[in-house]
Amino acid sequence: MKMAKVNIKNLFLGLILVGTASFVNAQTTQTDSAKATANTANTTAAQAGNPTIEGLKKQVEANPKDTESLAKLAAAYQEASDWTNAIDTWKKISALLPDWAPSYYSQAYAYQSAKDDANAKLAYEKYIATVKPEEVEQNKKNLAYAYFYLAFAEQQSDPNKAKEHIAKSLQYDPTNQDAIKLSKTLNS
């Protein structure tokens, strides 16, 4: 089991590096249901011919508790922009490994990419709550982004809470220019 946990951690670190580039700005735009349905249909059609996804689905069918294969499948769905299946797969991982913070961060990323801001916010909050004290150092960039997203999402509804979140974001990454700008806006 220790080997699987190490592999999952290495996989997640790789996912962080791949996903960070597309994860720069908080998204707050809602999509209409017709557009979301069209996107789901397109990604489902695209992934139907994806041999990586098909192979991983077979591995998961053979062993539904194989968290390493599930994580690879979730990442493959994300790569194909199939946010619905990515979210569902990350949720399965969270059910199997409820104390593994990266699954909540990845759920938040998928929700955010699917323009589901309410669930993205909840997943970022769960991620923050799940990061263990001994894991904070290796998760600083992700914690900074999670707090930035929460601050961005709450700037209109709860400015005081947004100020707390942006201060935490800057505590973890004082060089994030988006967080610096938001902090100036919130504190002006």
Image (spheres, helix red, strand yellow):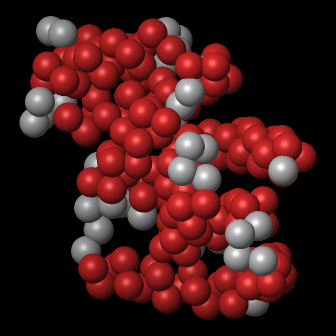
Query: Residue 15 location, x and y as percent?
Result: 71, 47
Quarter holding the C terminus is top left
Q: Nearer the viewer, residue 15 or 37?
A: 15
Q: Nearer the viewer, residue 173 or 8?
A: 8
Query: Residue 129 location, x and y as percent?
Result: 42, 33
Q: Residue drawn at (50%, 27%), measured in percent from left and top? A: 143
- When the figure is inspected, residue 85 is found, relative to residue 51, above or below; the finding is above
- When the figure is inspected, residue 116 is found, relative to residue 60, above or below; the finding is above
Q: Residue drawn at (27%, 79%), measured in percent from left and top? A: 33
Name which quarter of the figure residue 56 lies in. bottom right
Determine whether, in the image, residue 34 is placed left or right of residue 74.
Answer: left
Q: Residue furthest right?
A: 3
Q: Residue drawn at (18%, 10%), measured in percent from left and top? A: 187
- When the figure is inspected, residue 55 is found, relative to residue 87, above or below; the finding is below
Q: Residue drawn at (20%, 34%), measured in percent from left and top? A: 154
Determine whether, in the image, residue 176 is placed left or right of residue 116.
Answer: right
Query: Residue 17 location, x and y as percent?
Result: 72, 39
Determine whether, in the image, residue 140 is placed left or right of residue 128.
Answer: right
- When the figure is inspected, residue 55 is found, relative to residue 150, above or below; the finding is below
Query: Residue 105 location, x and y as percent?
Result: 52, 45
Residue 53 shows in the view? no
Name which quarter of the figure residue 70 lies in. bottom right
Q: Residue furthest front?
A: 1
Residue 115 shows in the view? yes
Determine whether, in the image, residue 146 is placed left or right of residue 56.
Answer: left
Q: How many marks?
A: 0
Q: Nearer the viewer, residue 121 or 27?
A: 121
